[in-house]
Amino acid sequence: MKTPQQISSELKQFTGSTVLYKHWLGFKYTEGIKYLADETNCYWLLDAIFSHQTKQFLSNPNLREFQIWHLRVENNSGILTCEWDTNQEVLRQEIEYTDFPLDRIKLYLAEEVLILPSEY
């Protein structure tokens, strides 16, 4: 099992993706996201983000092309938020329990592809 520091360090090495993986909800994600999900066993995070991509949510034109997602974890509970721009929060979901090993992670959803910031 890798330490949170090792995982964070390895995530920074992803700077592009030649392969896209397809999620069961029809969205795609990069090699960096696959690495994150495999190493931290957090496919639930992809499910959570993609499940919010409803017609009502996407009726906000600011969210159709680009979204910023944050997961913050403290004492084995988390808060998942979505912003359409820095500090412009449009969604907040409380996660009662998680064993996600990192204190925080930021992800982008750009044109229906979930990516790490370093892959943008």
Image: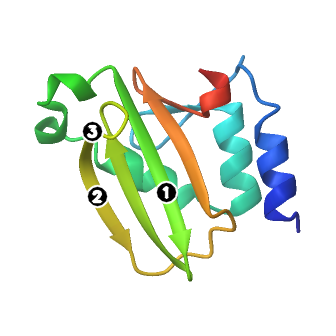
Q: Residue at horizontal 14%, vertical 36%?
A: 55
- Kindly identify which numbered label has been placed on residue 31: none
The Cα–Cα distance between marks 2 and 1, rounded to whole angstroms, is 10 Å
Can you identify the residue that label 2 sits on? Answer: 92
Q: Quadrant of residue 11?
A: top right
Query: Callout 3, which amino acid?
Result: Gln
Three-letter code for the amino acid on which mark 1 is drawn: Leu
Whether residue 37 sits left or right of residue 10 in the image: it is: left
Residue 33 location, quadrant: top right
Q: Nearer the viewer, residue 61 or 24?
A: 61
Q: From the image, tell me which residue sits under label 3.
A: 88
Above or below — where is 79 with respect to 24? below
Labels 2 and 3 touching (C-beta < 8 A)? no
Mark 3 and mark 1: span between their CA atoms? 15 Å
Q: Residue at x 56, y 80 (%)?
A: 76
> Secondary structure under badge 1?
strand
Q: CA distance from mark 2 to mark 3?
A: 11 Å
Q: Are marks 2 and 1 in contact (CB under 8 Å)?
A: no
Query: Residue 35: x and y, percent?
Result: 74, 44
The residue that appears at 77% across and 29% down in the rendered structure is: 14
Tell me: 82 left or right of 63: right
Residue named by callout 1: 71
Q: Is residue 2 left or right of residue 91?
A: right
Residue pictured at 53% horizontal, 40% vertical? 107
Q: Residue furthest front?
A: 87
Which label's residue is closer to the chain start, 2 or 1?
A: 1
Quadrant showing the C terminus: top right
Above or below residue 78? Residue 119 is above
Q: Position of residue 53 (x, y in %)?
A: 28, 40
The earlier-in-sequence mark between 3 and 1 is: 1
The spot of residue 59 in percent (x, y) is 11, 30
Place of residue 40 in the rendered image (x, y in percent of width and height, measured from the top left):
70, 61
